[in-house]
Image (cartoon, rainbow, N blue to C red):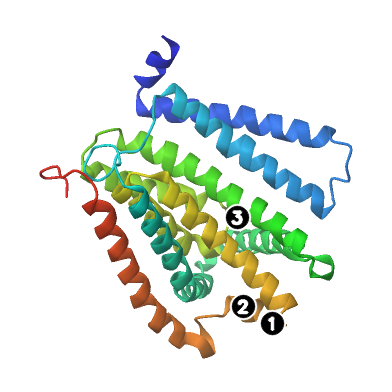
Amino acid sequence: MLKARHKDLHPLLKVAEWLLVMIVCTAAVFAVWRVLPINHASTGALLLFQGLQAFGVFIIPAICMRYLWGIQQPTAISGQPSVVSHQRSGLLALLGVGIMVTAIPLINSMVAWNESIRLPESLRGLEQWIQQTEAQAELLLQGFLTYKNGAWQVLLLNLLVLAILPGIGEELAFRGVLQSVISGQQSAVSRQHIAIWVTAFVFSFVHFQFYGFIPRLLLGALFGYVLLWSGQLGPCMLMHATNNALSVLAFYLGTYRWHLSQAEIDAIGTQHTWWLTLVCTPVMLLLIYLFRRIAVGSQPSTTGNQ
């Protein structure tokens, strides 16, 4: 009875209910973290906090909401549950990883362009706040990624906490909950396009890293279309985790193996390596096309939905 009532709630009430559960879980995460007998200023403690956040703020509320609302599986572009075979799922996974790898130069170029945007003088105070927020986020990330003697054990921990858990949790929350609520089960494709872009906007905004807002917005939209085409959250999670993992691995290899600075790593695809963006972007677009063709082609056809 309780599950049935929640399933029939208005989308705005569903979002409000989800946010309430997230707030309660966030408070619980802070409470648990504060009572732990550890040095809360240490890198290890902050990594633990990141892991707790992934579970408490994203994964647990999303699973609870999907259960209460009866969201068992996303619908594909056909309007029917996904029926992608195991063989095609494996191919989609490979294509998803390839898309993220070939997207690196373009993402870096877009970040560089996004960082060059300057607000009007009347918004100087806002711009200074954004710069301070970005600097603090960068310092925190540098603290996570700076390993004592480049220990591979810490690398694996960072891949788990900074790549795998966010990839699972954020996709469950944004694509698995928010996009599903906005689009509605069995809804028209036109409404799903709106759901994809609204969710992508919220996804980018809540990271509070505004110099990467536009690239993250487009990434969020890409993940949304991957869900629309395939009807599966798995490829979205894999691509999200791959994107984060590539950043972690780039820092590790660049710093401890190739002796590159963070600025040099971030400049891949820009400045002297601008040609990488020209070479990789068409390959990325081809892989996206193949992904869509395989994913949509494996679904039951529904007249007018494609």
N-terminal-most mark, 2 or 3? 3
Above or below residue 63? Residue 282 is: below
Residue 294 figure quarter: bottom left
From this view, report whether residue 58 is shown above or below residue 167.
above
Give 184 or 301, whichever is nearer the viewer. 301
Sequence order check, earlier mark of 2 and 1 = 1
Amino acid carrying label 1: it is Leu
Give how far across and how far down residue 262 sits, in percent: 67, 76
Residue 102 location (% of width, % of height): 44, 73
How packed is label 2: few (under 14 Cα within 10 Å), some, or many (20 or more)?
some
Residue sitting at the far left: 303
Q: Is residue 107 visible?
A: yes
Picture residue at 59% right of the left edge, 51% below the top: 164
42, 84: nearer the viewer: 84
Question: How busy is the neighbourhood of tag 1: few (under 14 within 10 Å), some, or many (20 plus)?
Answer: some
CA separation in Å, label 2 and label 1: 7 Å
**Total count of labels:** 3
Q: Find the distance from the CA under tag 2 to the CA under tag 3.
A: 18 Å
Question: Mark 1 = which residue?
Answer: 260
Q: Which residue is mark 2?
A: 265
Q: Nearer the viewer, mark 2 or mark 3?
A: 3
Indicate whether 168 appears above or below 127.
above
Q: Secondary structure at mark 3?
A: helix
Tell me the number on the disc at residue 62.
none
Instruction: Look at the numbered discs 2 and 3 and tell me whether their residues touch, using CB distance below 8 Å.
Output: no
**Do tag 2 and tag 1 residues touch (Cβ < 8 Å)?**
yes
Residue at 60% from the left image edge and 31% from the top image edge = 23
Please tell me whether mark 1 sits on a helix, a strand or a loop: loop
Residue 163: assigned label: 3
Amino acid type assigned to the residue bearing label 2 in the image: Ile
